[in-house]
Image (cartoon, rainbow, N blue to C red):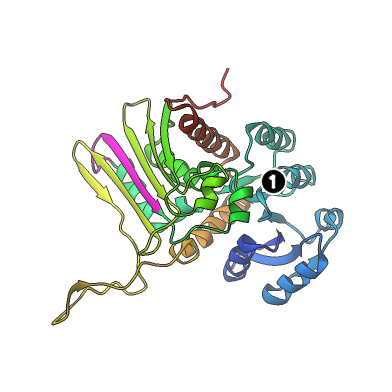
């Protein structure tokens, strides 16, 4: 029989509304508690997804009915919650990123070292079936030696300016997904990065000193080159593609649609439906698969994939990208190695 993990879901914002339905859909997860220090928000979310609304963190962490915690709160709260939950001895699944600074990430990792509970970081794109299939094909040697990896990640429209101000910058907020995914596929981390950025769509973003369009190159120890291009605006939808090029061939993932038929007629040729709108639609299955991995790791007593160390590395690379734009040169990421 499937072992049930009773979950405390921390937070009631956008990502909590992603995880609520996925917890309920999983046969091994049970939504036990929804926590928010504002009880009205917890009550509203509990009315949608179930679970007991709670606003007292001490009570949540002391509750013997809570087996594990999912942290889906704003990024600047992650470290504080990780410290508290780890001290309580409960397994943790945390939305990415760990934090926006390496100093606070080090705090979180110290807490996890002192309180070695299972910990998984929510880099959900690793768990997308197509991305995973591409990685497996690379690992099996289908394209021989990997020479280049490329990622296209373009969003349908810029986010609200309030979100941009709190995001930590485009590289930390968005490019970090591509960075983690491509390093995971490559099985190595860059020795240097070079990035460029522009603001072409939303002048408010530019006024904040941020970008809505970037290009990033990572140079790997093997000599492989990785290219990432990001845009906060894309007229035709959520553009998500990968390419792996090797000395024996190439692998690609393609954009997804709700209807994949290709239509021909008197007034159109090769006509197709629009792309899936945004990450909630495009990566819907990946969130479920990530929670399935967390459940399996905890119940089987093994370390979850997508670790705190992965989170620190992805942040270090993202911060190096931001510095590269500012200084106009290649930057070596700070992996914290002596």
**Where residue 296 appears, x then y in whole percent?**
56, 54
Task: Name the foreground residue: 321 vs 58.
Answer: 321
Q: Residue at x 43, y 61 (%)?
A: 156
**Where residue 207 appears, x then y in whole percent?**
55, 46
**Where residue 253 appears, x then y in whole percent?**
31, 54
Dot 1, how many residues are within 10 Å of its Cα: few (below 14), some (14-19), or many (20+)?
Answer: some
Q: Residue at x 74, y 38 (%)?
A: 115
> Is 197 above or below relative to 90?
above
The quarter of the image holding the C terminus is top right
Quick one: SS at disc 1?
helix
Residue 80, located in which quarter of the rendered image?
Answer: top right
Total marks shown come to 1
Tell me if I can see residue 198 in this picture.
Answer: yes
Residue 40 located left or right of residue 261: right
> Is 245 above or below relative to 278?
above
Q: Which residues are magenta?
A: 141-153
Residue 130, located in which quarter of the rendered image?
Answer: bottom left
Residue 94 located left or right of residue 111: left
Residue placed furthest toward the top: 338
Residue on which the image places disc 1 = 76
| In the image, residue 21 lies in the stretch drawn in magenta | no
The quarter of the image holding the N terminus is bottom right
Residue 73 located left or right of residue 38: left
Task: Name the foreground residue: 41 vs 321.
Answer: 321
Residue 86, located in which quarter of the rendered image?
Answer: top right
**Where residue 195 appears, x then y in whole percent?**
42, 35
Q: Residue at x 32, y 33 (%)?
A: 225
Residue placed furthest toward the bottom: 266
The overriding secondary structure of the stretch rendered in magenta is: strand
Tell me if I can see residue 1 in this picture.
Answer: no
């Amino acid at each position: 029989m499937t072992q049930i993990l009773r979950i405390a879901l921390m937070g009631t914002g956008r990502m909590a509304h992603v995880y609520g339905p996925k917890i309920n859909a999983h046969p091994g997860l049970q939504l036990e508690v929804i926590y928010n220090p504002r009880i009205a928000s917890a009550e509203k979310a509990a009315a949608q997804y179930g679970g007991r609304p709670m606003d007292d963190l001490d009570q949540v962490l002391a509750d013997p009915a809570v087996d594990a915690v999912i942290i889906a709160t704003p990024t600047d709260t992650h470290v504080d919650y990780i410290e508290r939950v780890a001290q309580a001895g409960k397994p943790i699944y945390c939305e990415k990123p760990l934090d926006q600074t390496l100093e606070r990430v080090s705090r979180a990792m110290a807490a996890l070292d002192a309180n070695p509970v299972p910990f998984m970081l929510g880099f959900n794109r690793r768990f997308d079936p197509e991305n995973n299939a591409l990685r497996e094909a690379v690992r099996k040697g289908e394209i021989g030696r990997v020479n280049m990896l490329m990622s296209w990640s373009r969003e349908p429209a810029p986010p609200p300016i309030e979100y941009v101000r709190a995001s930590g910058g485009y590289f930390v907020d968005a490019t970090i997904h591509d960075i983690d995914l491509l390093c995971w596929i490559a099985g190595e981390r860059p020795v240097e990065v070079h990035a460029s950025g522009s603001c072409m769509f939303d002048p408010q973003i530019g006024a904040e000193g941020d970008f809505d369009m970037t290009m990033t190159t990572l140079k790997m120890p093997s000599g492989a080159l990785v290219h990432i291009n990001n845009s906060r605006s894309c007229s035709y939808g959520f553009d998500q593609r990968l390419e792996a090029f090797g000395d024996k061939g190439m692998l690609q993932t393609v954009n997804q649609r709700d209807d994949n038929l290709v239509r021909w007629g008197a007034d159109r040729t090769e006509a197709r439906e629009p792309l899936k709108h945004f990450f909630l639609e495009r990566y819907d299955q990946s969130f479920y698969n990530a929670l399935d991995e967390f459940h399996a790791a905890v119940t089987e007593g093994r370390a979850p994939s997508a670790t705190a160390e992965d989170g620190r590395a992805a942040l270090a690379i993202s911060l190096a990208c931001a510095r590269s734009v500012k200084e106009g040169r290649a930057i070596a990421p700070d992996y914290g190695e002596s």
